[in-house]
Amino acid sequence: MAHLRSTVWGPAEFVGLPPWWLVGEGLLAGTLGATVIVGTAVWGAWYGNSELADGEPGLVCAAALALYLCVVRAGRALVGIVALLGVCLALQTPQAAAGVVLAERGHVESVVVTSVEGAAASGRGRYLCSVSDHDGVPLKVRIWRGCGQSTSPGDALAVVYDPKGRVPPRGAQSGASPAGSLRDLGGWAAALVAGCMVAVVRSYRLSAIAPAPR
C-alpha cells in the first residue's frame, strides 16, 4: 500500500514542512506554464497569428508540463490532474485573448438583427442573433451578447469589432477591460500553479546511500 500511495500521489519523503526550494521549484514551473499558455494566445490574437491564437501551443505547453512532472517522478494522479488543468486553461484562453484585443483597441458600431435563434434551437442555453451592417453585408459570426428573447429582426445591436480584423466581432459589453477579459482565467491558472506545486513537493525522495562493499 505504501508503494501504491507513493506511485499514485508521490512519496513526499520529508518530515515537517517541505523544503523551501522545492516549493519554489513547483511554483516556478506552474507559473511559467500558466504564463506561456495564456501569453501565447494573447500574443497570437494581438498580432493575428492564428496558430498561436487558437490555443494549440497552450496544449503543447500543458503536455510539456506533464512531461516535466513525469521526469521528476511526481505521483501519477497529480500528473494527470495538472495535465487536465493545463488543457482546460488552454481551451479557455482563446476567447479571453480575443476579449483582450477587443477591449484594448476595439471599436463599437451598431448592426441590424436579421434573424434570431432561440435558446433551445442553439443548444447553448442562449439566444443567437444573425446580424448585418448598415450596408446589408452579413457578419460571419452570430452575436449572443445583447441578444435575448425580446430581440426581433430589425432591431439594432451594439457590436465591438477589431479594426485590424484579427479577431471576430462580438456583442458590446459595458465596462469591458483587458484585465476583465483575463479574470475568468484566474481560477484555472491558480489551480494549475497550485497543482504543479503540490506535485513537485510530493515528488521529493530521500537519496538512498548504499554502503560501500568490502
Image: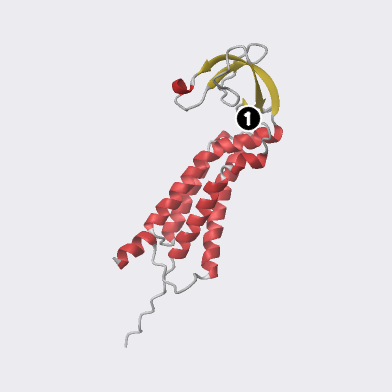
Q: Residue furthest left?
A: 1
- Residue 213's image quarter? bottom left
| Residue at x 43%, y 64% (from the top left corner) | 202
Between residue 159 and residue 40, name the one nearer to us. Answer: 159
Q: Amino acid at mark 1?
A: Arg
Residue 144 at x, y percent in the picture: 56, 25
Between residue 158 and residue 13, name the one nearer to us. Answer: 158
| Residue at x 35%, y 64% (from the top left corner) | 6
Mark 1: few/some/many CA within 10 Å (<14, 14-19, 20+) = some
Residue 146 at x, y percent in the picture: 60, 24
Residue 165 at x, y percent in the picture: 65, 27
Question: Which quarter of the rendering shows the N terminus?
Answer: bottom left
Residue 32 at x, y percent in the picture: 56, 53
- Judged from the image, the secondary structure of the residue bearing numbered disc 1 is loop
- Residue 212's image quarter? bottom left
Residue 206 in sight: yes
Question: Which quarter of the rendering shows the C terminus?
Answer: bottom left
| Residue at x 63%, y 11% (from the top left corner) | 136
Between residue 27 and residue 181, name the one nearer to us. Answer: 181
From this view, report whether residue 52 is shown above or below residue 12.
above
Between residue 173 and residue 19, name the one nearer to us. Answer: 173
Q: Label 1, on which residue?
A: 166
From this view, report whether residue 60 is shown above or below residue 26.
above
Residue 56 in sight: no
| Residue at x 54%, y 52% (from the top left corner) | 190
